[in-house]
Amino acid sequence: MNNPLTKILQFLDEIGIVYNMEPIIGDTFLPGLKIRNGTLIIDKTRLLYPGDVLHEAGHLATMPPQIRITMDDNLADNDLHKGGEMMAIAWSYAACIHLEIDPHIVFHEYGYKGGGADIVANFSEGRFFGVPLLQWCGMAYEKKFAEQNNTKPFPHMLKWTCDQRPD
């Protein structure tokens, strides 16, 4: 299975991220993708970069279910979604490693304000960001905490979807 989109969609099915394949009318933040009521909408005819599907799924996966089901296309400019962007980046990198997909498929030259290659380089060298937030949600551990909890550190994920935010 060499098609990254097929691998990504099978993974989303496995972890319970809901998506629909359907035409999208109008402009979207990312070509061929939008979020509607917690569902990732994918228009294969307009999708330019299959890795964008994985990143957008990360936005959904890193939010607790009660927030996930309310998420729509343009995420609010608030602390929750700013932190969610960092978590989605870390989550999608971990998913690439898990799926054995080249991270450059997600972090391509046309995304991340041209910084995709830098993100891959930093993560490949263990300079992560977003991981403390994933840890806060119980989804992954930073190295020092992984050792204390007798598990593997990020990019290993304890779980792929957020159950709930800790108090």
Image: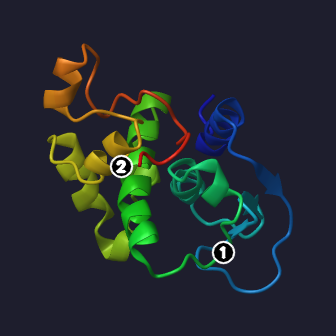
Res. 57 visible in picture = yes
Furthest residue toward right: 22
Q: Secondary structure at mark 1?
A: loop
Q: Which residue is nearer to you in this view: 123 or 143?
A: 143
Q: Quadrant of residue 137?
A: top left
Tag 1 residue:
73
Q: Amino acid at mark 1?
A: Asp
x then y, percent, for residue 142: 22, 35
Circle 2 Cα neighbour tier, 10 Å, few/some/many (<14 / 14–19 / ≥20):
many
Question: Residue shown at 37%/70% (left/top)?
Answer: 112
Q: Earlier in the sequence, mark 1 or mark 2?
A: 1
Circle 1 Cα neighbour tier, 10 Å, few/some/many (<14 / 14–19 / ≥20):
some
3D distance between C-alphas at marks 1 and 2: 20 Å
Question: Residue shown at 23%/46% (left/top)?
Answer: 123
x then y, percent, for residue 24: 81, 74
Q: Amino acid at mark 2?
A: Ala
